[in-house]
Amino acid sequence: MSAEVMRALGQLALRLLLSAAGVAGITFVAHKVIAGNPTTVAFAYLLFVLIVASTWGFVEACLSSILATLAFNFFFLPPVGTFTIADPQNWIALFSFLATSLIASRLSDQAKQRARYAVERQQDVERLYTFSRTILLLDSASPLPKQLVRKLTEIFGLSAAVLYDRRSGEIYRAGPSDFEGLHDRLHDTALNGTTFSDPQRNSVITAVRLGSQPIASLGIQGAQMPDSVLQGIATLIAIGLERAKAQDLSHQVEAARQSERLRTTLIDAMAHEFKTPLTSIKAATTSLLADPNQPLASRTELLKIADEESDHLKDLVDNAADMAHLDIAQIDIRSEPSDAGQIVREVIASMRAGIDDRQVAIATQDPLPPVALDRRLVKLAIKQLIDNSLKYSPPDTPIKVQVLKADDGVSLEITNHGPAIPVEEQSRIFERFYRSPSVERQIPGSGLGLSIAHRIARAHHGDLTLTSRPGETTFRMTLPIDHKGKRS
């Protein structure tokens, strides 16, 4: 016999003992203390039986009725002190009292049960309503089916819940207890729409249907509930699973849309960026072909221009490929001890043709500690930041690049003297494809450069931040001396 059954039997025995004690107490007071008349005593017994019925139940009230009838006969109906009755009318009175007390206790118990049932159904409706609202408020931080079973367990006070999604083949669990040994039942219910219950474990498995077609199975343990409530839960679970499916489809559509937008953006950016080196190369080769016999110094200068612009073109192709890869995949960090100041100087030297006559001042704090970083990626990030500063500041203003010591690393600060970035836009400036509405149609760009730079900084366990006020905007990229892990 289980501990729960033993505890229930013990509580019943205690209530029966208290019921008997109550009848004995009324009898003692009425017989020894106040010497009440039979009618008053009968009403006292009847009131006590009704109180017992409404408080505990019919079994306790039935015992109280029988004991009260015996005590009434023995102590208050003549001849007193025996269970015999001298006046035949007293027999009628005695049995009327017994019948009245039993019927009244039964009616009181039924009313109590109906009230309890109504309260339980109201609680079930409230829980179903809470669960339905919860489904609408679930986020995409974790799988929706997993959130569904966790919320179901919390709201209905279950010891265990398990959901088997037939379409994905995944099983989601929640609750402090285990729902073990029923995997075959879960699969069978999801396939055939059957129902399985185990009274010993207080568990049930039911099908989750979309229309007439089962799409999943739900197992719960630790709470008894009407079939209507269980089916209501299953219906809400089906709605939640369909919402999860719709959300996944939405993400796929958005990913496809973003991929197409990325492809178009990169093509446009490549076409714009490639024009300058291609124009220089074309001009140099056209000049050589038009006059092959021009002086050696002139031919050498033209070949040098073509060679330099070819390297520039190669860098643009590599950068475009890197940007496309970085925007859709994890970032592989191949770090090596590097001089951040030297990297900045190399980036600016490679951008000299695009910088033209703009003044770019470099300031480094010596000595700088060597930093473990991926030189290729950090160069790409710095190039994006400098290019951004060149595009969004007046052509007659300088760009200032500082490399400074920072806590456990170095910081690179790129400052321009363009208009301030509005405060409401600063929190979005590193989002992919985001461009300020005030400049979107005036200055060409992809909205990817700052996003890529931000991802590269984070991949090195550093950060990229922004401060902006009228006439001065500074991007600050911090890089730790060393970082743990190789992927972001």
Image: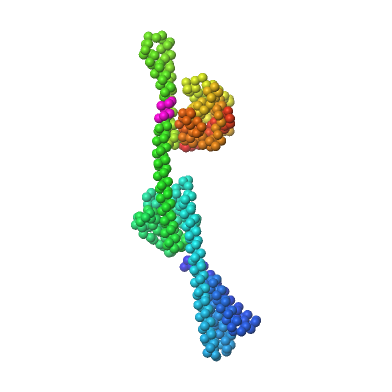
Outermost residue toward the bottom?
86
Seen in the picture, residue 195 relative to 257 is either above or below; the reply is: below
- Magenta residues span 267-273
Residue at coordinates 58% horizontally, 80% vertically from top-left? Answer: 43
Q: Position of residue 40 (x, y in %)?
A: 60, 81
The single residue placed furthest to the left in the displayed view is 192
Spot occupied by residue 344 in the image (x, y as percentages of width and height): 52, 25
x%, y% of residue 251? 42, 43
Give the residue displayed 47% in from the left and 68% down from the top.
Answer: 1
Colouring used for the render: rainbow
Q: Is 224 located above or below residue 341 in the figure?
A: below
- Residue 410 seen from this side: no
Q: How many marks?
A: 0
Q: Residue at x 55, y 90 (%)?
A: 86
Residue 256 higher or lower than 298, as above or below: below
Q: Residue furthest right?
A: 33
**Residue 270 is inside the magenta segment:** yes
- Secondary structure of the magenta portion, mostly? helix
Find residue 423 and report its image quarter: top right
Residue 337 in percent (x, y) is at: 50, 29
Q: Could you tell me if residue 366 is visible in this image?
A: yes
Q: Is residue 116 magenta?
A: no
- Indicate the quadrant where residue 18 lies: bottom right
Residue appearing at x 55%, y 76% in the figure: 49
153 on left or right of 367: left
